[in-house]
Amino acid sequence: MHSFITDKFWRPSLNTTTVALVVALFIVLADNRLFWRSFTSRLGLDSLEHWTFVLTVAVVYVLLLNVLISLFAFRPVFKPFLIILLLTTAAVSYFSDIYGVIIDKSMVHNILETDATEAAELLTWPLFRHLLWFGAVPATLVALTRIRTRSRKREALARIAVVCASLAVILGAGMTHYKQFVLFGRENRDLQMFLNPSYPSYAMQRVLRKTYFARAEEPLRVVAADAVRKPQGSRTVVVLAIGETARAREFAFNGYGRDTNPRLALRNVVNFPDVQACGTSTAESLPCIFSSLDREDYSRDKAAGQENLLDILQRVGVTVLWQDNNSGSKGVAERIAYEDLSRQSDAELCAGDNCFDEILLRDIDRRLAQSTDDMLIVLHMKGSHGPSYYKRTPDAFKTFLPECTQDNLQDCPQQTLVNAYDNTIVYTDYVLAKLIDLLRAQDFATAMLYVSDHGESLGENGLYLHGLPYALAPDEQKQVPMIFWASDDFIAQKSLDVGALAARRTGPYSHDVVFHSIFGFFDIKSEIYRSDLDIFSASRIAERMAGAMSTAGRREAHRYP
């Protein structure tokens, strides 16, 4: 009896053509909801013509996917391929549907470079439930299905017939709806990035090919070979604090309705309210911040093949140290001193695999006392890293309650999510204020520059987290905070007109200014140095106050397209 039930009811018998078509149909309809929402909202469904076009697009994508699946429709790879495909598309659809995430090259880099702690925060019950119904169940049905195959020759002919028939229907659909495909497609090319699994597969193969199958590594290209330092009158130490996932609009300095900067407001800092990030993810923005390339010329591969800001500083005699409480430097600190502080055994500042950002300040005094050299210290903060915002703040800094205390953000009331995020900004404010106090106590010239790598979406327009392609990303993911503080000795040594700087702080600026401003901090001379991107140079401030260039022209120089 058991054998009868298993054979007749639990193991349907289908040929490869039917199985491929059914799987393609399921993926297009069930795992592409973000695409269909975006497509139909832009197109509108107010006429029969539009409904017909939607149906045509669905048929075309089903058949294209059917062609792809048919290429693998032979033993012994067909079933394993379908199972992997179903599980992968289910995972992609969860993050696309719930968070509005698009799996492009930048996001693939993020996935490959995410550490176990960050990955664990994304493993929630809603994810497992989604994978069960949209991945495991259809994959199990595929595994239980008896797939009838023909002889090798007949199967090959059948595959050729399926591919030809599919392409013929696609061609016919394209011809009958040519005008709609061309006109709508031309204005909405970004929609291709929403297609699952085609675009994630494309992005993955591009990254894997360049990462693991590229040609032999070429020698690192020297940048600013002519760089020399002007002799310093006294010791200079600059701390560059790189924030994580902090967005500018949540800073009280920028007009936010909550007092998220109570301590920095008392420390004579200069706030820059209009700063654009180079990217919308750490994997993209972090190397870009330290690269001599501006965003228009930047690519991750190009930046990886040449020296960055830290290499140049080290070459001209500045001691460089990177201290990390995040998921690494994304290759930026490969050739300088590096310390990972994210997994320290500090009972007060660490819990499990999570350390609070104060861990970065624990040994600052000792580090400064160990050397008399000029130094750049990079502090890579955990900041406001999601989705576990509530884990980033000690209890004493949970100012706004109640807060969302789970990782499946979409299930939290909006205000509790904002409360948890705002608490991370309050804690960042405390850490930076404490850092300023440590630097102020030194008897040499010190300065701090804080800037976040990218911003964050907190449910606005149904988007969460970050990482959208730059052209599609909302301002919440691109507008970042930037704050500067300097000791009296530093101001005197660099002849900074802080009043003039504060008067022109509104910008707009971008991550492009960091490279050249750090050059200016250490008085490095090179052909690559651009004084117009050094927002702290005395000449730059003088030019602004004198009005040597039009305000509009200056603003365009720092605004990303």
Image (cartoon, rainbow, N blue to C red):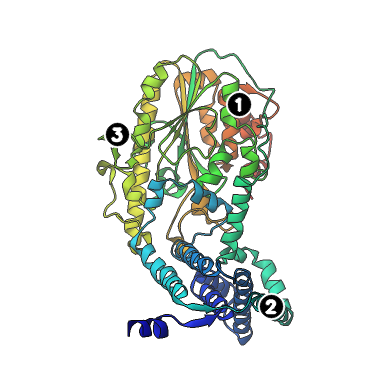
* Kind of residue indicated by mark 1: Ile
Marks 1 and 2 close (CB-CB < 8 Å)? no
Secondary structure found at label 3: loop
Mark 2 or mark 3: which comes first in sequence?
2
**x, y (%) of residue 124?**
35, 59
Total marks shown come to 3
Rate crowding at label 2 as few (under 14), some (14 to 19) or many (20 or more) other CA atoms within 10 Å: few
Marks 2 and 3 close (CB-CB < 8 Å)? no
Which residue was labeled with disc 1? 312
Q: How far apart in space, not on screen, are marks 1 and 2 (Cα)? A: 61 Å
Mark number, residue 157: 2
* Kind of residue indicated by mark 3: Ser
Rate crowding at label 3 as few (under 14), some (14 to 19) or many (20 or more) other CA atoms within 10 Å: few
Q: In the image, which is nearer the foreground, mark 3 or mark 1?
A: 3
**x, y (%) of residue 201?**
58, 60
Mark number, residue 345: 3
Task: Return the residue nearer the eye: 511 or 146.
Answer: 146
Horizontal arrangement in the rendering, residue 207 relative to residue 89 (left or right): right
* Kind of residue indicated by mark 2: Leu
Mark 1 or mark 2: which comes first in sequence?
2
